[in-house]
Amino acid sequence: MKFCKFCGAECKEDATFCPECGKQIGEPTNSVNVYVQPDMTPNNQKSSRSKIAAGLLQIFLGCFGIGRFYTGHTGIAIAQLIVSLCSCGIGSIWGFIDGIVILCTNNFRDAEGKIME
Ligand SMILES: [Zn+2]
């Protein structure tokens, strides 16, 4: 038995994290069960943004990159805006197609890597 150096709670000898306060109290003891920081795990979090909304915004307002602004992909959004302006609107087909792609992509992720539904 060992004790957490942060809160003094009793911990299992092989514990890596304190069951009381959750702080790391030791190195992972075997490589199979290495603890992965929550922000390092594959991100399966659900986005609060709606994929349908993003896709429709992009189909109707994709010439301004609105759908991409919505998903947080501002770099793409600004590029779409500039392409539309510089091509007198012809380039807005990019935003339109992008909207269809968003709608047709399973597990489409927003700029934070969260899955949009
Ligand atoms: Zn503790």
Image (cartoon, rainbow, N blue to C red):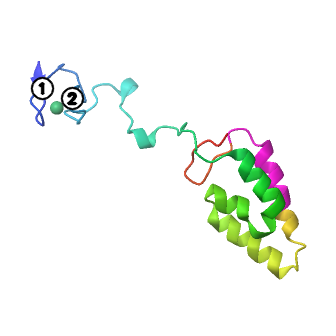
Element class at badge 1: loop
Amino acid type for the residue under numbered disc 1:
Ala
Amino acid type for the residue under numbered disc 2:
Cys
Is 57 left, or right, of 93 in this rendering? left
Numbered marks: total: 2
Q: Which mark is residue 9?
A: 1
Part of the protein shown in magenta? 95-107
Q: Please determine whether, in this image, residue 110 is positioned above or below residue 23.
A: below
Q: Which mark is residue 53?
A: none
- Between 40 and 83, the one lying in front of the other is 83
Q: Is mark 2 within 8 Å of ligand 1?
A: yes
Q: Ligand 1 falls in which quarter?
A: top left
Residues under labels 2 and 1: Cα distance?
7 Å
Q: Is residue 97 magenta?
A: yes
Element class at badge 2: loop
Q: Which secondary structure type mostly characterizes the magenta part of the structure?
A: helix
Residue located beneath label 2 in the image: 18
Q: Quadrant of residue 30?
A: top left
Q: Quadrant of residue 111?
A: bottom right
Q: Quadrant of residue 6?
A: top left
Residue 65 location, x and y as percent?
Answer: 73, 66
Residue furthest toward the right?
90
Residue 51 location, x and y as percent?
Answer: 70, 46
Q: Is mark 1 within 8 Å of ligand 1?
A: yes
Does the residue at mark 2 contact the one at mark 1 (Cβ under 8 Å)? yes
- Quadrant location of the C terminus in the rendered image: top right
Identified at 79% across, 52% down, the residue is 56
Dot 1: within a 10 Å radius of its alpha carbon, few (fewer than 14), some, or many (20 or more) residues? some
Is 114 left, or right, of 70 in this rendering? left
Q: Of callouts 2 and 1, which one flags the residue occurring earlier in the amino acid sequence?
A: 1
Identified at 28% across, 30% down, the residue is 28
